[in-house]
Image (tube, rainbow, N blue to C red):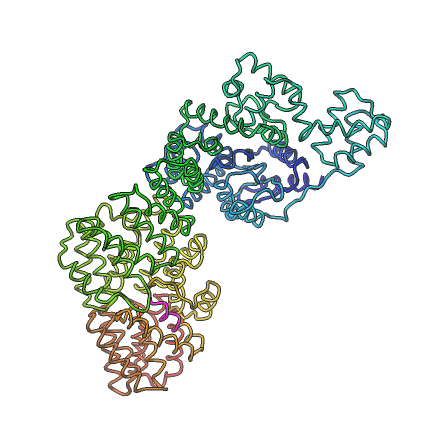
């Protein structure tokens, strides 16, 4: 009664207001405690109140079928639409989520799992608006496929702004690993603690017994019913049905027969009862258990090798024996099914009773039936996974085809299972390396460490040649990079390049080597690397993508080293085609990876070509959102959009973009290079806004502290960390960090004073304590800035110099800084220079202009400092 009341209240809350927040209830209990009955009651209550109800159910033998449960939920609503309507409702998500739902053909590209998840969330969001009030019921969630549970966990987090009621029923335990974590996340998002169902009390069992068998059932008989079943509602109902069938009088004299009757309803007793129905009925039940879902008499007949009349007779026998039943039409689930098992406990018992060799053989026949029906390799894959390994070349091919289909709909874990099973067959020697390579690609997004092992094994055996081998080497190096094994990534590509002679493959590998070395944050770089890269790039005209890549790498390297900015821009421009990325070098193209384009974007961002950098960032956002890539790639796109805003001086917009990026990065995983990039840029933005306490809180919360990653992060990690320490008053630690930043940058040859700005902050920090050293630093900063040549670099160097001077010399330097920064696209730095000049020159006009600029930038802290200067220096600031 308590559970029913809570469910009724949830339905009433949903129906009361179209704008009411969504809610989630989780029912937990062992098998037979009444979870399914409660869901059925929820459906009755909801439909009585005019709700739309969609339902789905996990299946023990169907856990390997990706998106199985979410398809059950959503397909009935979508297949009832015309194709044009379905496309309209899913909108931009149609090509991303449609294949996972089975309403659109998959594309050729591997779908991003996070993007598919977002598309499925969007699908429910849009359909819920149409079908409000909407109730979603998910039974046996412990047996749902991993892809559905991933979606459900993400969906549960978004319920606050979506008016829909979700009720999930599951058993405790049963699963482990990622699926268990997803279910735990669902439970954590529930509106109230998980409802744990309990068994019937002796009094309740007695009431049920008398309601079923008549009021003449005596107390001793009722107590024995409870003792035999343990109060399990399902077992109690089944036992009482058998008492009725056997016409046993419900009195104490017959109580001793209850235990034997109960055994016939479960486990070995059920199997014995099934065998008593005859071999044909047993084969029919076995075939139904193999199929698991969409059980039709014709399909079972084919699998059990029965003619149609015998199959119909067997189906009726099994219905009479309460083993199979007709599907409940009130569930709303669509499909061709004629039959389903009365309870999952029965399905499990029947499936487990099939002799092992026969079960595997029947799965093989089922796979053939599914394939012959034209449903594709992916649909047959769950059966192929169960077939006994037998050196079957055709089965290896089918599993590889299934893996490709799974990857195309965003189910890499399902693809992994298919390819791992293909290796057990095993493949022919000439195919083995290709299967390992495909397995490495399947695990690339989800398990970089596994990818490394698979690709190394593939490269260590014959079979991978030509472009496929080069692809495998590049993919291996990318996996090593994402696994924070940068040194090995560089050495891997270098060794393969040395093995090859000159030609396009060698040039590609050399370019990848230069790329990884360019973002390696190790203390030293290989001797002469920049010179070799410059020499190689000097021969490039940009006629093909390998040459364009080398031009980008050379431009990035020159920018990091602080070489002339005009030459950096000229190199980068030559890598474009009519000012745009060349075909094959787009944001979603996989041959070179996202790192290359981030290098190009960074080169433009730090040479004051912010229009070009922002154009690239916005293109990345559009490309990833269109392709449904909402994992690490989209996080980086938002981070670099934030970097563009930060460089422009649009600090509030920068913070918004970076917080969006951080939300995405959290889902991908902490500790990865992209996570450092996002966190570093957010801390830097908060600092220039004047929000030092919030910057410190973000740093503490997200681990922005040593040890640092093995990849280069822009702006320089140590410089940002040092600035943070100074801002929160930890001066000695800040000075130490800034000195370490200078040392690390010098070892790498990174002399660009804009992204490695630690020397400027260090000079300011040492101005009083060690003015001579501060002055030497200022001279070095100015020399580097003039070499680099951007207005921002020179203006920032002059700001540092002005801080270290006094009198009219300080005023003149500050005035020159304003002049340079006024021409720079970096408005925050211009605002800061205006404020500093106003103070030094005692000019109210410049202070007020600096204040206005600071406010327009969102630099609250700088604005506060300007106001303080106006207040405290009012009698000394000239009126000009």
Q: Residue at the spot x=42%, y=80% of the render?
A: 732
- The main secondary structure of the magenta stretch is helix
Q: Quadrant of residue 809?
A: bottom left
In the depicted view, which residue is nearer to us: 775 or 90?
Answer: 775
Residue extending farthest to the top is 309
In the depicted view, which residue is nearer to us: 618 or 253?
Answer: 253
Q: In the visual, does 126 lie left or right of 528?
A: right
Total marks shown come to: 0
Q: Residue at the spot x=21%, y=66% of the render?
A: 528
In the depicted view, which residue is nearer to us: 335 or 455?
Answer: 455
Residue 225 position in % (x across, y down) = 78, 32
Q: In the visual, does 51 lie left or right of 790?
A: right
Quarter of the image for the C terminus: give it.
bottom left
Quarter of the image for the N terminus: give it.
top right
- The span shown in magenta is 714-722
Q: Does the magenta stretch include residue 717?
A: yes
Q: In the visual, does 746 lie left or right of 176?
A: left
Residue 238 position in % (x across, y down) = 71, 28
Q: Is residue 695 magenta?
A: no
Q: In the visual, does 839 lie left or right of 169?
A: left
Vertical position of residue 506 compared to residue 134: above or below: below
In the depicted view, which residue is nearer to us: 217 or 479?
Answer: 479
Residue 378 position in % (x across, y down) = 42, 32
Q: Residue at the spot x=80%, y=22% of the render?
A: 248
Vertical position of residue 193 compared to residue 750: above or below: above
Residue 779 position in % (x across, y down) = 24, 80
Q: Residue at the spot x=15%, y=50% of the render?
A: 543
Q: In which quarter of the image is residue 856?
A: bottom left
């Amino acid at each position: 009664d308590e559970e029913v009341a809570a469910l009724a209240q949830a339905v009433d809350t949903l129906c009361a207001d179209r704008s009411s927040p969504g809610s989630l209830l989780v029912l937990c209990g062992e098998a037979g405690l009444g979870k399914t009955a409660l869901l059925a009651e929820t459906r009755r209550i909801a439909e009585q109140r005019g709700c739309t109800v969609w339902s789905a159910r996990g299946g023990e033998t169907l856990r390997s079928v990706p998106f199985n449960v979410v398809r059950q939920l959503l397909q009935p609503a979508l297949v009832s639409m015309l194709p044009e309507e379905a496309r309209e409702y899913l909108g931009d998500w149609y090509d991303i989520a449609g294949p996972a739902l089975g309403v659109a053909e998959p594309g050729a590209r591997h779908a991003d799992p996070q993007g598919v998840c977002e598309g499925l969330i969007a699908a429910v969001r849009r359909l819920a608006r149409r079908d409000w009030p909407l109730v979603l019921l998910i039974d046996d969630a412990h047996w749902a496929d991993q892809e559905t549970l991933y979606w459900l966990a993400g969906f549960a987090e978004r319920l606050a702004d979506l008016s829909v009621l979700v009720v999930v029923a599951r058993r405790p335990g049963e699963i482990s690993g990622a699926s268990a974590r997803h279910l735990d996340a669902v439970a954590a998002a529930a509106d109230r603690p998980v409802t744990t169902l309990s068994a019937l009390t002796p009094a309740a069992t007695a009431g049920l017994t008398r309601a079923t068998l008549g009021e003449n059932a005596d107390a001793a008989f009722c107590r024995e019913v409870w003792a035999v079943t343990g109060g399990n509602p399902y077992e109690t109902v089944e036992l009482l049905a058998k008492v009725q069938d056997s016409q046993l009088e419900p009195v104490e004299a017959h109580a001793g027969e209850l235990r034997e009757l109960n055994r016939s309803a479960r486990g070995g007793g059920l199997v014995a009862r099934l065998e008593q129905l005859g071999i044909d009925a047993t084969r029919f039940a076995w075939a139904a258990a193999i199929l698991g879902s969409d059980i039709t008499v014709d399909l079972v007949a084919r699998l059990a090798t029965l003619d149609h009349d015998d199959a119909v007779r067997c189906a009726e026998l099994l219905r009479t024996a309460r083993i199979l039943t007709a599907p409940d039409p009130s569930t709303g689930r669509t499909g061709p099914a004629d039959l389903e098992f009365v309870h999952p406990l029965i399905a499990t018992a029947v499936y487990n009773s099939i002799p092992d060799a026969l079960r595997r053989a029947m799965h093989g026949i089922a796979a053939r039936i599914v394939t012959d029906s034209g449903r594709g390799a992916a649909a047959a894959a769950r059966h192929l996974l169960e077939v006994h390994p037998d050196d079957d070349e055709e089965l290896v091919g089918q599993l590889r085809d299934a893996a490709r289909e799974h990857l195309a709909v965003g189910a890499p874990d399902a693809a992994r299972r298919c390819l791992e099973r293909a290796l057990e067959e095993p493949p022919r020697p000439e195919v083995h390396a290709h299967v390992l390579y495909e397995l490495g690609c399947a695990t690339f997004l989800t398990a970089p460490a596994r990818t490394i092992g698979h690709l190394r094994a593939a490269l260590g055996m014959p079979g991978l040649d030509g472009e496929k081998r080069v692809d495998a080497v590049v993919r291996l190096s990318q996996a090593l990079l994402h696994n924070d094994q940068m040194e090995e990534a560089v050495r891997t590509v270098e060794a393969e390049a040395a093995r090859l002679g000159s030609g396009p493959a060698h040039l590609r590998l050399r370019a990848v080597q230069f790329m990884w070395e360019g973002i390696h944050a190790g203390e030293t770089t290989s001797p002469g690397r920049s010179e070799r890269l410059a020499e190689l790039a000097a021969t490039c005209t940009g006629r093909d993508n390998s040459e364009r890549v080398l031009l980008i790498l050379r431009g990035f390297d020159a920018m990091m080293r602080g070489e002339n900015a005009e030459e950096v821009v000229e190199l980068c421009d030559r890598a474009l085609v009519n000012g745009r990325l060349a075909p094959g070098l787009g944001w979603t193209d996989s041959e070179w990876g996202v790192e290359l384009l981030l290098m190009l974007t960074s080169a433009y961002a730090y040479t004051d070509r912010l229009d070009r950098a922002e154009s690239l960032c916005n293109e990345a956002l559009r490309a990833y959102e269109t392709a449904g890539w909402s994992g690490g790639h989209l996080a980086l796109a938002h981070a670099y959009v934030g970097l563009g805003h930060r460089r422009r001086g649009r600090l509030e917009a920068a913070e918004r973009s970076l917080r969006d990026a951080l939300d995405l990065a959290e889902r991908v995983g902490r500790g990865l290079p992209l996570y450092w990039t996002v966190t570093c840029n957010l801390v830097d933005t908060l600092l220039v806004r004047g929000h030092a306490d919030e910057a410190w809180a973000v740093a503490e919360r997200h681990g922005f502290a040593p040890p640092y990653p093995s990849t280069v992060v822009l702006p320089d990690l140590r410089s940002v960390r040092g600035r943070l320490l100074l801002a929160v008053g930890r001066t000695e630690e800040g000075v130490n960090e800034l000195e370490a930043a200078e040392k690390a940058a010098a070892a790498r040859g990174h002399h660009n004073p804009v992204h490695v700005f630690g020397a400027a902050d260090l000079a300011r920090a040492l101005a009083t304590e060690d003015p001579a050293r501060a002055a030497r630093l200022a001279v070095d900063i100015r020399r580097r800035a003039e070499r680099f040549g951007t207005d921002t670099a020179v203006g920032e160097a002059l700001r540092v110099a002005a801080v270290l001077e006094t009198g009219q010399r300080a005023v003149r330097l500050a005035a020159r800084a304003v002049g340079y920064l006024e021409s720079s696209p970096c408005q925050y730095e211009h605002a800061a220079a205006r404020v500093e000049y106003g103070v030094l020159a005692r000019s109210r006009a410049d202070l007020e202009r600096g204040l206005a600029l600071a406010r327009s930038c969102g630099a609250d802290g700088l604005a506060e400092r300007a106001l303080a200067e106006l207040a405290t220096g009012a009698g000394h600031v000239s009126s000009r």
